[in-house]
Image (tube, rainbow, N blue to C red):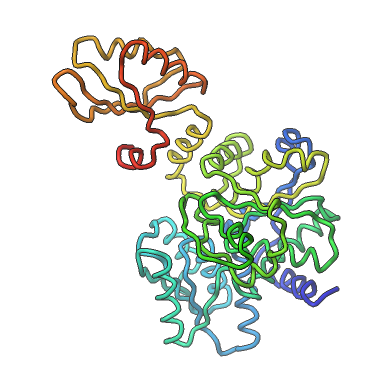
Amino acid sequence: MTDFAQAAKAATAALRDLFAPTPLLRNAYLSDRYGADIWLKREDLSPVRSYKLRGAFNAMRKVRAAQPDQTAFVCASAGNHAQGVAFVCAHFGVKGRIYMPVTTPEQKILKTRTFGGEAIEIALEGDFFDETLAAAKAWCAKAGAHFLSPFDDADVIEGQASVAVEMLDQLGRAPDHLILPVGGGGLSAGMLSYLRAVGAETHPILVEPVGGPSLTAALRIGAPQTIEITDTFVDGAAVARIGDRTFEVLRDIPKRDVHLVPENRICVTIQEMLNLEGIVLEPAGALSINVLEDVAEQIRGKTVVCVTSGGNFDFERLPEVKERAQNWQGLKKYFILRLPQRPGALRDFLDLLGPGDNITRFEYLKKNSRNFGSVLIGIETDQSTMFDDLEERVASRGFGFRDITNDQILADFLI
């Protein structure tokens, strides 16, 4: 057994002071749907509802062992890493200073404070994460504290490898395929390092959101690079730059094994898992399940483990999830309707709608002239093919009708 494998096992054993192994559960719904033996490694059921607790604990454990006098730690995070650090600060009885952007939702601040209690102090600095990170590192250097990286740290990577240790013990064998979300790369680097160290013949499939493909970009040029995040919806995986250490582990992954999935499609998975299975997943936690439809032929008849990396979902986001899911499924659209300013014009338009159509928004924007006015209208339907038929009917009656659903500028401004 290699040194890394031994260290990962030691980290796993030490974690038992905090929590029992997260469940590895076979999912009958997904197994039947894809004709495979599909298991979910439920990191969404850890004490902080994500795997981040593992790396934070292992890094702090090793720092404390090497430097017993080190009692001050700092991190920068607006999400799962902050909660993991808060939890382990309380566990070890040390002081933690957690930097978060000023724009962090109050719900995330309260959850972090709940886990850390009197052991932590939360500092809100910067409108953007880069500013928050700079403030955290500046204070860290000034105060002589230890900075806990969210992913690009050898001890953090080692701690995340404990997910693989548990998985092999629980399954009793190596799965044919392991599907992992990728953000900064800590989870994938840790788990794949352990599987390689023990000689497991498991084929990895890695998943990123379309709006934050940092690993894909790094593989393209052979080195980490800073990318522009075009969609922050999958906040747990939309990372602008993959870690240097983590990329060294992942650099040999074939590009064909790194998949990009659309944010709106992820929302369909979030809804399905909540409504059909009663499983609450955050967007990043749904990545490994969402990609199954892209690799369906590859995994058919195989044993597959999907890591559901987190379940810290703010239910205030449910309307957005529903909206995005309907957009992907073609069940909801927004239009600008040019409506004649005459009695009965609105009734004439409403008569064009079918029995399964529902107007969810109706807002006069302005009159373009004495004779016409512009209306923002949102329509839901139960059949995606309805919209093509509706547009033909509307055009035949002489109404102006423009689909702005995917016009990002107009949608952001009007919707």
Locate the C terminus by quadrant.
top left
Query: Residue 305: x percent and y percent?
Result: 74, 50
Front-most of 109 and 250?
A: 250
Picture quadrant of residue 160: bottom right
Count of all numbered marks drawn on residues in the image? 0
Q: Residue at the location (38% across, 71% down)?
A: 123
Q: Residue at x 50, y 66 (%)?
A: 82
Along the horizontal axis of the image, is 62 left or right of 338? right
| Residue sitting farthest toward the left | 370
The N terminus is located in which quarter?
bottom right
Q: Residue at x 52, y 44 (%)?
A: 263
Percent x, y for residue 255?
68, 54
Query: Where does the image place residue 408, in percent across and percent down from the top left?
Result: 39, 41
- Say if 186 sits above or below 264 in the image: below
Between 316 and 19, the one lying in front of the other is 316
| Relative horizontal placement of residue 89, taking residue 404 as reference (left or right) | right
In the rendered image, residue 383, in percent from the top left (x then y), is placed at 52, 20
Above-or-below relation of 134 to 334: below
Q: Residue furthest front?
A: 221
